Amino acid sequence: MKMRIFEGIIGILEQLQKDQSITTTTTTKNEKLQADLNQIQKEKENVEKEMQTLHSQLKEKEGNDLPKEFLSKISELKNSEDFDQIYKFFEEISEKGNQKMMQKACDEELWKKQDDDYGRNVLHEASSKGNLRLLKSLIECGCDKEIKSRGGDIALYWASRESQLEVVQYLISVGANKETKNNYGWTPLICASFNDKLEVVQYLISVGANKEVKNNSGKTALDKSKGAVREYLLSIAKK
């Protein structure tokens, strides 16, 4: 009887040893796995740092390849408040079709310089004037199409205000927010309606612009509309 009890105890002890061995093995495996993961993460961070360094070196090399006169002009304009001269500089680069020069000027954030009247930058000015070639170059260089002027207006607003339909269409095609409001709650649609820009109004509505949205005074596009736009908005309101 005692022998059976001892045998049972021995069996339990042997099982406990096996379980402990399994636990120890599992713990060791987990620790090794964690160490491997830490090593991989460290290597990933090192690769990212190397890529950033190479990217910076590449940009620097590209900058060194550009004419000294061009680089000097950028330095000069960065210290200038003459917005017309800065905008003309971008127009000239665009006309040459030199995207390396355009990228350098954008990297130096020269495009963010603003005019005195509305706080418009080069992107806003190109949209307002309908300079589609310049606008495309700026956006391809990473300029923010949603950046706002002093009154909270984005490029799409300025293009809509001046009835630059091709620019409006392009901005929508690259994802410009057609419902963005300025500081007064005006959307591009309300602005185009107020300025009687029928083609722009028709296009914005065709791509889903909300004609019922209200500005800070509680007015819709129809409320602010005039002329041909008012007739059009009234005609579609009846449908």
Image: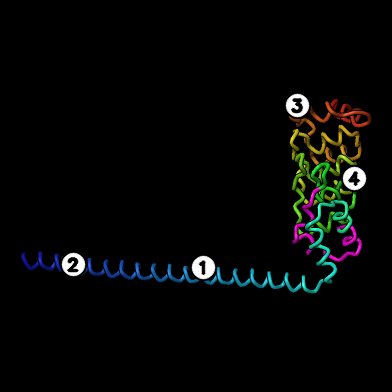
Q: Amino acid at mark 4?
A: Gln
Q: Earlier in the sequence, mark 2 or mark 1?
A: 2
Badge number at residue 217: 3
Crowding at dot 3, Cα within 10 Å, few <14 / some 14-19 / many 20+, comes out as few
Crowding at dot 1, Cα within 10 Å, few <14 / some 14-19 / many 20+, comes out as few
From what the image shows, is residue 161 above or below residue 110?
above
Decide: marks 4, 3 in contact (CB < 8 A)?
A: no
Q: Secondary structure at mark 2?
A: helix
CA separation in Å, label 2 and label 3: 83 Å
Q: Earlier in the sequence, mark 4 or mark 1?
A: 1
In this rendering, which labeled residue sits more in front, label 2 or label 3? 3
CA separation in Å, label 1 and label 3: 54 Å
> Where is residue 148 shown, x and y percent of the image?
75, 45
Q: Secondary structure at mark 4?
A: loop
Crowding at dot 2, Cα within 10 Å, few <14 / some 14-19 / many 20+, comes out as few
In this picture, which residue range is highlighted in magenta? 90-114
Q: Amino acid at mark 2?
A: Leu
Badge number at residue 13: 2
Q: Earlier in the sequence, mark 4 or mark 3?
A: 4
